Image: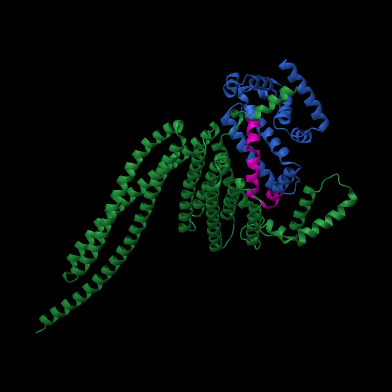
Amino acid sequence: MKKVRQQLKNLKNEDAWQARHSWVLENKQLLMSQISKTNVEAKGERKEKTFSENWRNFAHIYQSFVPHNINKAFRPVLTAMMALVITTGGWVASAYAQPGDFMWSTKVAFNSVVEQGKLAFTSDENKTSVQLEFASKRAQILRQVVDSDIENKDTKNKLIKETSEDLKHKLDNVSESLQQTDATTASGLVKELSLKTKEISNTLKDAAAQTAIEDEGLSKDLSLQATDTAKQSLELVEVVLEKKIEANLEISEDEKLIIREHIAESVLEIQKDTEKVQAQADKLTEETKVENNDSTQTTTSSANNIELLTIVTLSASTTAVTSTAKTGDSVTEIKSRAAELSKTIVTENNNVQVLLDSNVLEAVKKTLELKNTISTLSHEVDTTLSNYNLENKVLIENKTTTTTTIISTSSTVRGVVTSTTNIIKTP
Amino acid sequence: MKAKYQEKILVHKIQQNGDTESFAKLYDLYINKIYRFTYLKLGNREEAEDITSEVFLKSWNYLISNRDQVIKSFSGLIYRIARNTLIDFYRQNSNTEVSLEDIGDIASHAQIAQHLGAKMEVEKVMKILQKMKREYQEVILLKYIEELSTSEIAEILQKNNTNVRVVLHRAVKVLKKLLE
């Protein structure tokens, strides 16, 4: 029977019976966004905590944690003790604090102190893992803050900003700690690093999407941070692989599988980013074309109207046309680069797939290189787009001023002409 | 024991504050277990994934809509939900004419062989396990694969401890006989 039991236990470790890592992660993201919605609805229903609700909360703790078979004589004593702890312990209140609550900042500060304490008692080889755990916790807090129903938008955005900065800091700590870890310890971290950092990047993406309506700037920052985290995630895997290769340690099949999934997801993201950049460049090209035509028309109509104002109008319009043309040039360049990159990605993707079987480290490096190229291009498009919007704003302002001047000057000239005609007509 | 209390704290936080962070922790703890439980019964990866997702969503909804109920053990709750979801799944797909008693027979031999590959002994145990009565299959799965306690199994199967022990004894006897 012992043998059968062992065989049954072995079933648990069979690869076929394990859930796919990527599915586990995707499903978690989906589930979290689904339950966050129901949670917000439920919270709306019970906004104000009454005394009876607090009492019910206490009763629930009591029933959940005090064993049922405990001697009845001890129950009043235990009740009194628990009541004392709950009413006097500030930390209990802060432990249950939600974002926006009075005790929230205390909870965050308390957690930081606890983390520092934990870190002080952690051995060097476990430090990366612990730091990663802290970073994951920050990502969960960020999700909590984003999902929270804080009414004051400024307070909420400030909290989101603080938490995301804290998260960035924690991730930097992970990188630093990993650099100092020896190869043997680092080799066991591939799975943990890959999965957790991917999860953090996804949380940041979700946060960026959720904040897009309320604060575009914040959303952009979070989106940028998500991209950086995705890059950092690959970099961490790269560091581990380098350490393993240096120490002549073999990369296991399980690790290869995780890295393969990681790279596949990264390549997919790169493709999506390239498409986005191309779409943005297309949109910009269209807009700059329309703007060029508009500027020329303004110049012509101004010239037809009043000769006196032609010089002023012409100079303003020429400046606008020149700057729009400049934007147009850079847009055309970006567009062609994006198209070129799109082609390169198809080829490089195939190269990466081949490399995955022969040289995992090279495959990671190649993906990282592609990721860097696309993020530089994406940044350039963003800059061009904001420059273009700025120029457009100036152009509109110039147009308005010129039109107003034309209208007022034409009526003055018309008045002068009428009076002169009247004078001539008068005998 | 420490883990059990930690789970209770997480469940309490979910019930009282709708804490999603605590649910994420429970998800990490149970995702593989529940997936394994459903996969062993269905033998199909996609279906097992769908059912597992549904089980977690149902667990969350149950916890936040039954705030006053004291949950003795989360494992008991989630496995019970998984079991009921599987039964519902088979009821909805009843046109395949599979009786509830034969849930375990769904996975084809080809699928089993494909999944277990060269590990013949494991394959043999699995085949036999899947041919057993649903009740026996469940107790063996929960006791020896998931390593749950008798009282937890009793809660999941909604039986008393003695009944579970009896069923387990019979199941092991049948399994032993089939293996011989």
In the picture, measured across the screen, residue A423 lies left or right of residue A299, that is left
User: Residue extending furthest top?
Assistant: B180
Q: Quadrant of the N terminus of chain A?
A: top right
Residue B143 located left or right of residue A142: right
* Colour mapping: by chain
In the rendered structure, the answer to whether residue A379 lies left or right of residue A6 reads left
The residue lying at 35 percent from left, 41 percent from top is A342
Of A113 and A127, nearer the camera is A127
How far across and down, in percent of the image, does residue A80 sit? Answer: 84, 57
Chain in green colour: A
Residue B31: within the magenta? yes
The prevailing secondary structure element of the residues shown in magenta is: helix
Give the quarter of the image for residue A337. Answer: top left
Identify whether A22 is placed above or below B101.
below
Q: Nearer the viewer, residue B124 or A235?
A: A235
Q: Residue furthest right?
A: A73
Q: Is there any visible trace of residue A141 in the rendered image?
A: yes
**Residue plotted at (70% across, 35% down):** B79
Above or below: residue A350 compared with residue A368? above
Give the farthest residue toward the left: A427
Residues in magenta, as a range: B12-38
Say whether residue A212 is visible.
no
Q: Residue B20's x, y, as percent?
A: 63, 49
| Vertical arrangement, residue B98 with respect to residue A412, above or below | above
Residue B96 percent location from the top left of the image: 61, 23
Q: Colour of chain B?
A: blue
> For the C terminus of chain A, which image quadrant?
bottom left
Instruction: Using residue B53 as the reference point, say whether residue B62 is left or right of it.
Output: right
| B96 in magenta | no
